[in-house]
Amino acid sequence: MKRRINRDPALLPVRLKRMGKSTLRTMLLLGLGVIVLYPLFYSISIAFRPASELYDPLVILVPRTLVLTNIKNALGYLDYWVSLKNSLILVSVSSLLQVISCSLAGYGLARYRFRGSGLIFGMVLLTILVPPQTVMIPNYMNFRYFDPLGLVSLFGAVTGQPANINLLNHPLAFYLPAMLGNGIRSGVIIFLFRQFFRGLPKELEEAAYLDGCGAFWTFLRVMAPNAGGAYLTAVLFSVVWYWNDYVYTSSLMSGYSTVMNRLYMLKDNISHIMEYEINQSPQEGILILQAGVLLAILPPLIMYLFLQKYFTESIERSGLVG
């Protein structure tokens, strides 16, 4: 049976309006897609092309010849496998500690009212607004002369011997702030958890209290299992922020071999390497550097490709939209 098409002239303006909205939405999404994806495609193209095609006007995105020389050179200059292992350990542990501490802080700010809770939440929001460069020097001094509660100075005064703890170039410089809810952009993650836990019904907690659970076990056994979407969102954000960070890594972990540290060292020394070490043209250096950039973004890109479905769903349920 053929479907009858309503050709009522009175509905023509409505159809044109819908068509215009659909066309505008499609053009907008295509434009955003080009803005986001073009640099990635161009980076891949540069990383796999020979130096002779770098400035060839006839080669735009698809090289005539695919070579692996740039990737091999970048792997060597980045000391990639050692740097990748160090980065994965540093990022994984820091993100795990950060998500745990921030979820506890977010739950406390969402469910409990106490003297100064509003001030504390305001300070959390302030950490989102303050650029990390403004506290870089105090952070550096704090970890260079680490003195928790003045105990190290007290020990030095008692023994008469100079005492100081240097945590620079040690993973604890990242682990301790993450453990205490003060890691990289922890304010955003605390805010995310606060918004999510505020949206959960209080009946869940009341039922747990009636069953004899205290505040901590209520959070651990009832609230946290219902916050899977928020946890996934927080983990993905935290991993990407720690992986891409250079401000804290360059100041606190400058001597620690991570992918980002090695990439910035390669960027700063690429001209010297090309001219004095391997006697190659500057074009070759650009290709190696671009291959290094591609290797640096590859792990979080692979993670997102596998988790993007769950990430999109968790964003919708985590309080960041809607």
Image (cartoon, grey):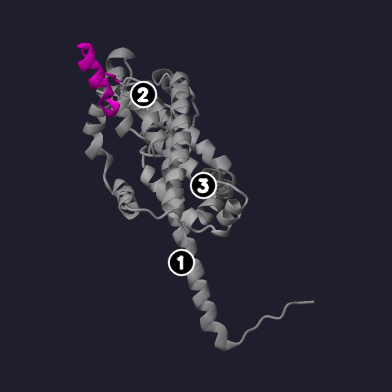
Say which of marks 2 and 3 sits in front. 3
Q: Is residue 129 above or below residue 23?
A: above
Q: Which mark is residue 215?
A: 3
In the visual, does 309 lie left or right of 157? right
Assess whether residue 157 is covered by the magenta stretch. Answer: yes
Tag 2: amino acid? Arg
Distance between the Cα atoms at labels 1 and 2? Answer: 43 Å
Please state which amino acid type lies under the numbered disc 3. Answer: Ala
SS type, badge 3: helix
| For discs 3 and 1, the disc positioned in front in the rendered view | 3
Q: Residue at x 62, y 84 (%)?
A: 7
Return the residue at label 1.
24
Drawn side of residue 193 relative to residue 123, left or right = right
Q: For the magenta stretch, what is the residue range?
A: 146-166
Label 3: how many residues lie within 10 Å, few (<14), some (14-19) or many (20+)?
few
The residue that appears at 29% across and 27% down in the rendered structure is 148
| Mark nearer the viewer, 1 or 2 | 2
Residue 102 is drawn in which quadrant?
top left
Which comes before the other along the chain, label 3 or label 1? 1
Quadrant of the image containing the N terminus: bottom right
Q: Provide the residue designation for mark 2.
A: 262
Q: At which x and y percent is residue 178?
A: 40, 35
* Lower sequence index among marks 2 and 3: 3
The crowding category of the residue bearing disc 2, from other C-alpha atoms within 10 Å (few below 14, some 14 to 19, many at least 20), is: many
Graded by Cα atoms within 10 Å as few (under 14), some (14 to 19) or many (20 or more), the crowding at tag 1 reads few
The amino acid beneath tag 1 is Leu
Q: Residue furthest right?
A: 1
Under circle 1, the secondary element is: helix
Circles 2 and 3 in contact, beta carbons < 8 Å? no
Magenta stretch contains residue 181: no
Q: Residue at x 46, y 40 (%)?
A: 99
